[in-house]
Amino acid sequence: MVLAAAASLAATKTPPAAPAPPEGVQTAQPAPAGGYPYLIFMPKGYSADATQKWPLVIFLHGSGERGTDIDVVKKNGPPKIIAQHAGSPFILVSPQLEAGPDGSRWDSAKLDALLVDLRRHYRIDPSRIYLTGLSLGGYATWDWALKRPDLFAAIVPVAANSENKAADLCVLKDMPIWAFHGDQDDVVDPLQGFAIVKAVDACKGSVRPRMTIYPQMTHGSWEPAYDDPAMWRWLLEQRRSVPAPGDTDKNSKKKADKK
């Protein structure tokens, strides 16, 4: 009877949490339900203190990295940079967008699902969630932030504009924004990128958006943007005074709006 009781107790015992991914390197992770597959970089020291929460940087790649080979995401932007900076003090998540027959766009609902799963499994500081993206991913950076301004401590759109023409840009008036663009960009009109930053600035929020225009630079403005230590210092200094809500689905957002 004692053995039977012990066996029953062992069978009902909650299994231990899955170990965190290796620290100081990027590893591929499968898509959570309703989300995207992703690369994750875990900072060194993550496992040393089970109570510490860490900043999260989410990077959205451009059209050239769509597909099923997750290593292609390391071609540009933060996943490329962090390979040379293993001591970076934040979690970096870089999802991959599938390739469609006519191209595909980032889906903010799937990004919401990914973020919910990340926050469920990793110790993420809800006041320090940052969003950045280049080109197609920069468009998605504007789009997701416009839909969910309650989530992010700061955004960094690079070589991008917003396709959400019906959005109220003033929802971003209190969000730290630093946009980057090349003045000779022949893919995304830099004047349109400047116009959205100017429109947010006209809302007279608590913080003025910033924009850096690189002279004689075409579409690849992400190279100097992500290579700039000042951008990273600025980004990691930003904190939300009201932490991001615990659930990022639309229903929780609607409930919050009614309060």
Image: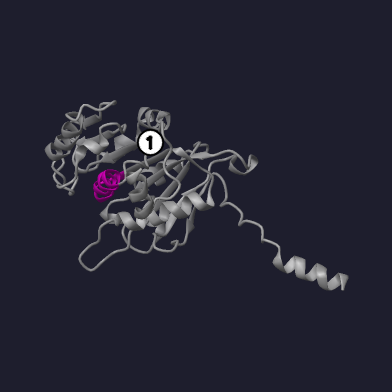
Snapshot quadrant of residue 32: bottom left
| In this rendering, position of residue 85 left or right of residue 221 | right
Q: Nearer the viewer, residue 11 or 111?
A: 11
| Residue 76 falls left or right of residue 24 | left
Q: 221 or 166: nearer the eye?
A: 166
Q: Is residue 2 magenta?
A: no
Quarter in which the C terminus is drawn: top left
State the scheme by which the image is colored. one colour
**Where is residue 176 shown, x and y percent of the image?**
31, 31
Q: Quadrant of the N terminus?
A: bottom right
Spot the residue most to the front. 259
* Secondary structure state at the residue bearing disc 1: loop
Magenta highlight on residue 134: yes
Within 10 Å of the Cα at label 1, are there few (<14), some (14-19), or many (20+) other Cα atoms? many
The amino acid type of the residue labelled 1 equals: Ala
Residue drawn at x 14%, y 36% as measured from the top left: 195
Q: Looking at the picture, how far across and down is residue 40, in whole percent?
A: 47, 50
Chief SS of the magenta region: helix
Kindly identify the residue that appears in the image at 50 percent across and 36 percent down.
89
How many numbered marks are there? 1
Magenta range:
133-147
Q: Residue furthest right?
A: 2
Which residue is at the front of the view, 1 or 204? Answer: 1
Q: Above or below — where is 47 with respect to 180?
A: below
Residue 252 % position (x, y): 38, 51
Quickly name the residue at label 1.
153
Question: Residue 110: which quarter of the image?
Answer: bottom left
Residue at the (63%, 42%) spot, across then down: 50
Residue 99 location (% of width, % of height): 29, 64
Q: In the image, 243: left or right of 159?
A: right
